[in-house]
């Protein structure tokens, strides 16, 4: 794409941030993003809620408040009942309402496979914007949701997952990153991104590269959905996770980690958590605020001086 030259564009595509940010005035900027996905679960209502939470997450990662949204829909109207589309939209609407977001319409096309998501607009003060390109050496890295979502949803698709596990992963994916975002804005952090299709290490590589730092991640500190370990040992791995693993080969020093452990760290997530870089001085306050807000956050590593974008992944 041609590089934009508008001086009021505070965040564009160059830093691979989660959303675009445009300054309207000295104390107001609008934040815009769009995201849509194919079904990751069988239940139409749950799919709609997950897709909406996933799209809203990009706004939260910028430290902004989502306000307005438009539906993005692809649906095979000739082969699936429209009542199913109604349930998808109801799930998205309920999740948006939970976030205080108004959905005001959207656009749909006839498609061979269901697709749903949102184009979202949010507000942020220009001075309170959180980017993925401003992490500092020595920052603590905080993750707010467990990994393993992609592996478990692949297990659901292959009918290898029990209902209890399916319900749990739906709950994780449907959870808004609102409380985590509120905590990080209150405390003040250096950088943030959300964890979605590129997996933890893929998004961490982008953050590190954009910030000009390297990072260290400790596997034993990373929260992982327990069922994901059993599935990955049985070879249940989505294509997106394998693609992430191949791409990251030039950037990650895996130390002693087994291939299955590497794949967990590369697992392609849907509606994953926030990955926050915070100074050591503010780390305790952030973790306390996250915990008091009901967010099960974990410190998983740190940023270090380096060439930018390299990752050292160790077991402990």
Image: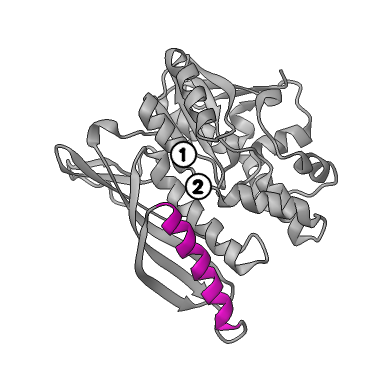
Residue 152 image offset from top left, x and y in percent: 73, 50
Q: Which residue is outermost to the right?
A: 234
Residue 228 image offset from top left, x and y in percent: 76, 43
Q: Residue at x 41, y 42 (%)?
A: 60
* Residue 6 seen in the figure: yes
The picture quadrant where one finds residue 114 is bottom right
Q: Which residue is outermost to the bottom?
A: 78
The colour scheme is one colour
* Residue 16 seen in the figure: no
Question: Which quadrant is home to the C terminus?
Answer: top right
Horizontal placement of 162 versus 172: left or right?
right
**The residue tagged with tag 1: helix, strand or loop?**
helix
Determine whether label 1 and label 2 are within 8 Å by CB: yes
Give the labeled residue for mark 2. Answer: 176
Q: Residue at x 23, y 43 (%)?
A: 29
- Mark number for residue 179? 1
Residue 302 image offset from top left, x and y in percent: 54, 19
Alpha carbons under labels 1 and 2: distance apart: 7 Å
Query: As rendered, which of 312 and 19 lies closer to the eye?
Result: 19
The chief SS type of the magenta part is helix
Badge 2: few (under 14), some or many (20 or more) residues near its Cα, within 10 Å?
A: many
Residue 262 image offset from top left, x and y in percent: 71, 33
Residue 2 part of the magenta-drawn span = no
Query: Eyeballing the image, is 299 above or below 97?
Result: above
**The residue tagged with tag 2: helix, strand or loop?**
loop
Magenta region, residue range: 81-99
Query: Eyeballing the image, is 76 above or below 96?
Result: below
Horizontal placement of 244 versus 36: left or right?
right
Q: Residue at x 28, y 32 (%)?
A: 128
């Amino acid at each position: 794409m041609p590089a934009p030259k508008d001086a009021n564009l505070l965040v564009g595509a160059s830093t691979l941030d989660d959303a675009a940010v445009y300054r309207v005035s000295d104390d107001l900027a609008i934040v815009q993003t769009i995201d849509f996905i194919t079904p990751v679960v069988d239940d139409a209502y749950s799919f709609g809620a997950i897709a909406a939470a996933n799209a809203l997450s990009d706004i939260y990662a910028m430290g902004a408040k989502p306000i307005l949204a438009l539906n993005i829909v692809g649906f095979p109207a000739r082969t699936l009942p429209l009542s199913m589309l109604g349930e998808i939209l109801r799930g998205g609407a309920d999740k948006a309402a939970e976030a205080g977001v108004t959905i005001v319409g959207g656009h749909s096309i006839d498609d061979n496979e269901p697709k749903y998501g949102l184009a979202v607009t949010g507000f942020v003060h220009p001075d309170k914007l959180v980017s993925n390109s401003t992490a500092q050496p020595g920052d603590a890295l905080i993750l707010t949701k467990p990994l393993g979502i992609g592996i478990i949803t692949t297990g659901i698709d292959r009918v290898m997952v029990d209902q209890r596990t399916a319900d749990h992963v739906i709950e994780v994916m449907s959870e808004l990153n609102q409380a985590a975002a509120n905590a990080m804005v209150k405390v003040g952090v250096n950088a943030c991104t959300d964890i979605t299709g590129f997996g933890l290490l893929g998004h961490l590589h982008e953050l590190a590269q954009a910030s000009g730092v390297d990072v260290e991640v400790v596997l034993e500190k990373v929260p992982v959905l327990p069922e994901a370990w059993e599935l990955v040992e049985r070879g249940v791995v989505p294509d997106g996770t394998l693609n992430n693993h191949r791409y990251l080969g030039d950037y990650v020093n895996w130390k002693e980690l087994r291939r299955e452990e590497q794949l967990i760290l590369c697992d392609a997530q849907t509606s994953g958590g926030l990955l926050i870089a915070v100074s050591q001085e503010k780390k305790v306050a952030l973790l306390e605020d996250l915990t008091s807000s009901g967010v099960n956050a974990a410190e998983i590593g740190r940023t270090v001086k380096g060439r930018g974008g390299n990752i050292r992944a160790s077991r402990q």
